[in-house]
Image (cartoon, rainbow, N blue to C red):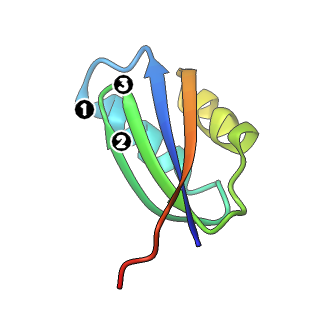
Amino acid sequence: MTHRMDVMIDGMVAVHCVRAVETALVTVPGITFHEVTVGRVVVEHDGQATEAALRAAVALAGFTVRTIATGRRLPTL
């Protein structure tokens, strides 16, 4: 089953911020998909990625996580 995290990020104001977060997400094991926009990241993972790992990656990029909402994505038929 695929897990999903919706991450709200403070401090992102431009496209270069998006690139910095995308680069930092490479360090998080288990991510199978990510979509980064200014102020928000949607991540799908196989269950290995943790909130702590996402917070650390965002901090590595120079930003702060405001909130993380977690859930599960149903498999497509």
Q: Secondary structure at mark 2?
A: helix
Q: Which residue is mark 2?
A: 19
Residue at position x 30%, y 28% in the image: 38
Provide residue 70's location: percent of width, then percent of height: 58, 42
Viewed as shown, does residue 38 lie left or right of 6? left
Q: Position of residue 18 (x, y in %)?
A: 34, 36
Q: Disc number at residue 15?
A: 1
Q: Amino acid at mark 1?
A: Val
Q: Left or right: where does residue 48 sit relative to residue 44?
A: right
Q: Mark 3 vs mark 2: which is more N-terminal?
A: 2
- Which marked residue is nearer to the observer: mark 3 or mark 1? 3
What is the number of the mark on residue 39? 3
Q: CA distance from mark 3 to mark 1?
A: 11 Å
User: Mark 3 is on which residue type?
Assistant: Gly
32 up-or-down from 10: above or below:
below
Judge the density around disc 2: few (<14), some (14-19), many (≥20) Cα neighbours within 10 Å: some
Indicate the position of residue 41 as horizontal and vertical percent values.
Answer: 42, 39
Pinpoint residue 39: horizontal percent, then vertical percent.
36, 25
Front-most of residues 11 and 1:
1
* Residue at image location 72% in from the left, 48% down from the top: 50
Residue 13 found in image quarter: top left
Q: Amino acid at mark 2?
A: Arg
Q: Residue furthest bottom?
A: 77
Q: Nearer the viewer, residue 74 or 33?
A: 74
Q: Are marks 1 and 2 in contact (CB under 8 Å)?
A: yes
